[in-house]
Image: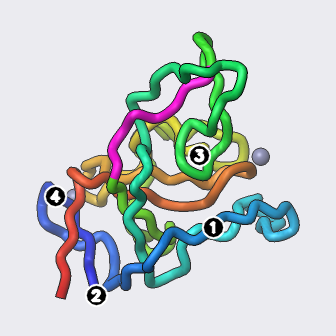
Amino acid sequence: MTVFLCSKYDTAITPELAELAAIPDVFDDERDRDKKTRRAPSTVPRGHYVIDPEPWGPPYVMQHDQDDPKPAQSRGPLVCREEGFVISAGSRQTVLLHPDDAAGLQPLPNWENSNGCCGPTGDEGLNRACPCGAPVATLAADCFGPCELHLDPVRTYALSQ
Ligand SMILES: [Zn+2]
Ligand SMILES: [Zn+2]
């Protein structure tokens, strides 16, 4: 079992979690979304985590093939900025978990990087902070795209038993 801690003051931000063997596939079916929050079911079930080998978060760079763009980050939607479709060139190895397994995290002041329609899209950068104030994670929880929390691999660390 593994607990994840904030790198700043070594405080636990998750309960004990078990590692999944692989990232669960996402089936984005409108009927599975919560009627009120419009969130999809979390990619990762409660009590588990999995390391995401795909790039996540900023910097976002221009995609080479603008006629056949890919999602900006794993499992998410296409993101078109002023200059064109972008793709993440951010950290690999973010820790993917159920948002409710890090329930103590809070939005950043002024909801920084939390833009979205019904919730944060999660494609602007870190948007959730440890109670100590350090930004440590990105929540994606909008009415399109996946619902999941990514812990930053530098601002948090794992302690396994
Ligand atoms: Zn919406
Ligand atoms: Zn902290």
- The residue at which mark 4 appears reads as 7
* Residue 24 figure quarter: bottom right
Picture layout, residue 48 above or below residue 125: below
Residue type at tag 3: Pro
Instruction: Give me the C-alpha separation between circle 2 and circle 1.
Output: 23 Å
Residue 88 forms part of the magenta stretch: yes
Q: Which mark is residue 25?
A: 1
Q: Are marks 3 and 2 in contact (CB under 8 Å)?
A: no
* Of the image marks 3 and 2, the number of the one nearer the N terminus: 2
Q: CA distance from mark 1 to mark 3?
A: 21 Å
86 and 68: which is toward the camera: 68
Between marks 3 and 2 in the image, the one whose residue lies nearer the viewer: 2
Q: Which residue is mark 2?
A: 1
Q: Which residues are magenta?
A: 85-92
For residue 48: magenta? no
| Secondary structure beneath label 3 | loop
The three-letter code of the residue at mark 1 reads Asp
> Residue 131: which disc?
none
For marks 1 and 4, give the CA distance. 30 Å
Of helix, strand and loop, which one carries label 1? Answer: loop
Q: Nearer the viewer, mark 1 or mark 4?
A: 1
Q: Is mark 4 within 8 Å of ligand 2?
A: yes
